[in-house]
Amino acid sequence: MFCEDLFTTGVAVQTGRVLAGVADHMKDHPEARTFLPSDAREPSQQEIVLTLQRSGAEVLLNYLPVGSKRAARMYAECAL
């Protein structure tokens, strides 16, 4: 488990857009943890906007890897 000491917040984590791709070194990481993209359908930009509006979100934390300019811009536009 990534973190055993999490408490219930009621926050739903949802699949987003993979606009910058996935680095090869993350697909076959030597440690026990690897990163693989979800098989779930990626939401459209409009679906992300609707999700933010419906949730009543006041803050969108944009924590993306260096070089993810396209993804960062899309999420900033969704928040605006």
Image (spheres, rainbow, N blue to C red):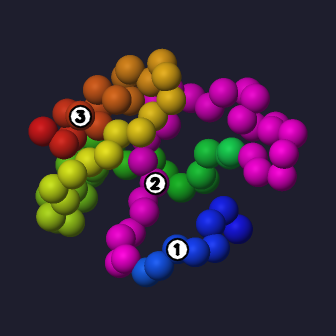
Q: For mark 3, what is the residue? A: 76
Confirm whether the magenta stretch covers residue 26: yes
* Residue appearing at x 60%, y 53% in the figure: 39
Q: Of circles 1 and 2, which is in front?
A: 1
Q: Mark 1 Cα within 10 Å, few/some/many (few <14, many 20+)?
A: few
**Left-right relation of 68 to 26:** left
Overall secondary structure of the magenta section: loop
Q: Is residue 13 left or right of residue 25?
A: left
Q: Which residues are magenta?
A: 9-34
**Marks 3 and 1: in contact by CB < 8 Å?**
no
Q: Is residue 50 magenta?
A: no
| Between 3 and 18, the one nearer to me in the picture | 3
Q: Quadrant of residue 2?
A: bottom right
Looking at the picture, which amino acid does disc 1 mark?
Leu
Q: Position of residue 48 (x, y in %)?
A: 28, 49
SS category of the residue bearing label 1? loop
Identified by mark 2, the residue type is: Thr
In the rendered image, which residue does mark 2 sit on?
15
Q: Position of residue 20 (x, y in %)?
A: 50, 26
* Residue tagged 1: 6
